[in-house]
């Protein structure tokens, strides 16, 4: 008998390689992806009982090829004559393809899954299935939606890719940088999806974090010289390092300043710092590297009071010029408040009041509430906490904000700000 | 039989004057009950809805559907959250009573229509 985890790890590693080999040879990403899923399911059923085959990757390729033939047989009798000959499962050329699956194939696969014609939810689902080797059921569990929803999302995403005439390639510059940016954003979204939810089936959401980190590691192996890829990996590691301290036993959010720092994962912090140190200065500094550098400064502080806020503020100043946006302004206001006092932070927040992009998020109001509390304006702080609680769509956040408001009403001494 | 157990928006206003310990206790009660119903297999679905002030209403105006901000009905009457449970009526009422016993705020228990001709 073979361990379930060992099998899953193998399948996830081989899934994109087998898919890339099939797509490179036959085109038709859509049909090939279905065939690979079928092969993965077959392996999940057979391997635990029969043991892992001697050449697991070839086994998967053979089963996937058969599934492809069957699908084509079912769909078109005319096509059958052409494909059956080409798709003999023992085909040596195909096996050679598999051996030759390289860097560019996996990258091309990632680019297809993160194609700009797709909506972010579709990009996430397709990336996790085609590159991550997760099943539709696993993805559905992670996103807390019915399996049929994810299945339909994937079918439609593949149709759109076909209709857009997307090509299986690793394009030349400047398109390459642009498309790589989308891939990084999709990986960042997968990570955030797992990180921002802390209540409910927390363990399943943690799988999304692990998967985002695994895929970003894979991307870094393929593109070791891309500074922003390394920056994103460092950012994920340095942020996820605080996971155990981020919520209490009941799933309630604990702000950065109040976290028990000895619960932080020192190995993850060390790895993130090492990646960051090797990367900074090797390429153009981008938003992921800067955010990772900020996360590192938080991680390095032995206590909240020991945080190097002037340095963090300086990094936010750079981030404001490299990648300006309302969310950056919001974080910069927090740093500003720590360095120059809550009123300075509140003044900067005021510049966001008319920003349309902030109209539908609770974050502006939540930060304002914390700064008002620091400034000693408890009545206004309480109103801001309550308004933020009404605006959020996150249940744990709402509970946290309601509690903060209730504490002010019952005049418990004010606590520190959320970082 | 399936029932929808509903909680209404007024509960937010009703709890604002409570002390933090009471509010934390309510959060704990709701989370524990939700976990219990899911683990027992009685819960078919459950969700909390975002505040009605964040809602939009689509109205048929001048010959076309037009989205406008907010439902302007009484907040206390708007749905705040629900459980759909597959249990008999007695059990559904018992579940609602557990919450009402703490919050002192009313909940509604409604039978969900069957899709089959013979219930």
Image (tube, coloured by chain):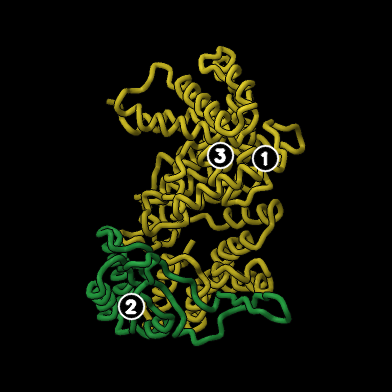
Chain colours: A yellow, B green
Where is residue A231 drawn, in percent x and y? 58, 41
- Look at 35% across and 32% down and name the residue there: A45
Say which of A408 and A220 sits in front: A220
Quarter of the image holding residue A303?
A: bottom left
Q: Name the residue under label 2.
A: B109
Where is residue A194 drawn, in percent x and y? 46, 51
Circle 1 SS class: helix
Q: Earlier in the sequence, mark 3 or mark 1?
A: 1
Front: mark 3 or 2: 2
| Chain holding disc 2 | B
- Look at 37% across and 65% down and name the residue there: B116
Same-chain status of marks 2 and 1: no
| Chain holding disc 1 | A
* In this view, A122 is above or below B62: above
Q: Are marks 3 and 2 in contact (CB under 8 Å)?
A: no
Q: Do the residues labelled 2 and 1 touch (CB within 8 Å)?
A: no
How many C-alpha atoms fall within 10 Å of the one at disc 3: few (<14), some, or many (≥20)?
A: many
Q: Which residue lies furthest to the bottom in this view?
A: B74
Label drawn at residue A162: 1
Evaluate whether residue A17 shows in this view: no
* In this view, A45 is above or below B106: above
- Look at 31% across and 74% down and name the residue there: B26
């Amino acid at each position: 008998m073979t361990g379930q985890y060992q099998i899953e790890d193998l399948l996830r590693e081989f899934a994109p390689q087998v898919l890339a080999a099939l797509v490179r040879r036959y085109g038709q990403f859509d049909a090939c992806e279905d065939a690979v899923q079928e092969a993965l399911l077959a392996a999940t059923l057979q391997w635990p009982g029969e043991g892992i085959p001697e050449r697991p990757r070839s086994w998967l390729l053979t089963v996937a090829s058969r599934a492809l033939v069957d699908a084509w047989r079912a769909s078109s009798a005319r096509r059958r004559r052409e494909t059956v000959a080409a798709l003999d499962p023992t085909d040596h050329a195909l096996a050679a393809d598999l051996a030759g699956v390289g860097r560019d194939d996996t990258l091309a696969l990632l680019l297809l899954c993160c194609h700009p014609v797709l909506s972010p939810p579709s990009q996430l689902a397709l990336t996790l299935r085609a590159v991550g080797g997760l099943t539709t059921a696993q993805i559905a569990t992670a996103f807390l939606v019915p399996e049929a929803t994810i299945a339909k999302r994937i079918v439609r995403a593949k149709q759109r890719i076909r209709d857009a005439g997307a090509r299986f390639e690793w394009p030349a510059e400047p398109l390459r940088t642009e498309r790589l940016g989308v891939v990084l954003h999709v990986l960042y979204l997968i990570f955030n999806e797992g990180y921002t939810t802390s209540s409910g089936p927390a363990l399943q959401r943690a799988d999304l974090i692990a998967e985002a980190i695994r895929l970003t590691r894979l991307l870094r192996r393929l593109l070791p010289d891309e500074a922003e890829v390394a920056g994103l990996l460092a950012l994920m590691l340095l942020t996820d390092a605080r996971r155990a301290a981020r919520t209490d036993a009941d799933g309630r959010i604990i702000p950065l300043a109040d976290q028990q720092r000895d619960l932080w994962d020192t190995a993850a912090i060390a790895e993130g710092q090492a990646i960051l140190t090797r990367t900074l200065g090797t390429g153009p500094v981008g938003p992921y590297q800067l955010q990772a550098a900020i996360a590192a400064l938080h991680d390095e502080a032995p206590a909240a009071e020991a945080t190097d806020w002037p340095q963090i503020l300086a990094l936010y100043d750079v981030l404001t010029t490299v990648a300006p946006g309302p969310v950056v302004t919001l974080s910069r206001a927090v740093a500003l408040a720590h360095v120059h006092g809550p009123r300075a932070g509140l003044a900067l927040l005021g510049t966001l009041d008319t920003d349309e992009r902030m109209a539908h998020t609770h974050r502006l109001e939540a930060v304002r509430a914390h700064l008002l509390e620091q400034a000693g304006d408890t009545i206004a702080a309480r109103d801001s906490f309550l308004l933020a609680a009404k605006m959020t769509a996150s249940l744990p956040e709402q509970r946290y904000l309601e509690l903060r408001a209730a504490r002010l009403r019952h005049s418990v001494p004010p606590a520190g700000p959320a970082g | 039989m399936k029932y929808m157990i509903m909680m209404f928006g007024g509960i937010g206003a009703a709890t604002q004057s409570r002390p933090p310990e009471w509010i934390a206790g309510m959060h704990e009660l709701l989370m524990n009950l939700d976990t219990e119903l899911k683990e027992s297999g009685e819960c078919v679905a459950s969700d909390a809805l975002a505040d009605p002030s964040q809602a939009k209403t689509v109205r048929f105006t001048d010959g076309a559907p037009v989205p406008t901000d907010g439902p302007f009905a009484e907040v206390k009457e708007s749905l705040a959250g629900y459980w759909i449970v597959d249990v008999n009526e007695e059990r559904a009422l018992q579940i609602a009573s557990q919450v009402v016993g703490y919050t002192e705020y009313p909940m509604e228990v409604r039978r969900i229509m069957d899709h089959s001709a013979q219930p």
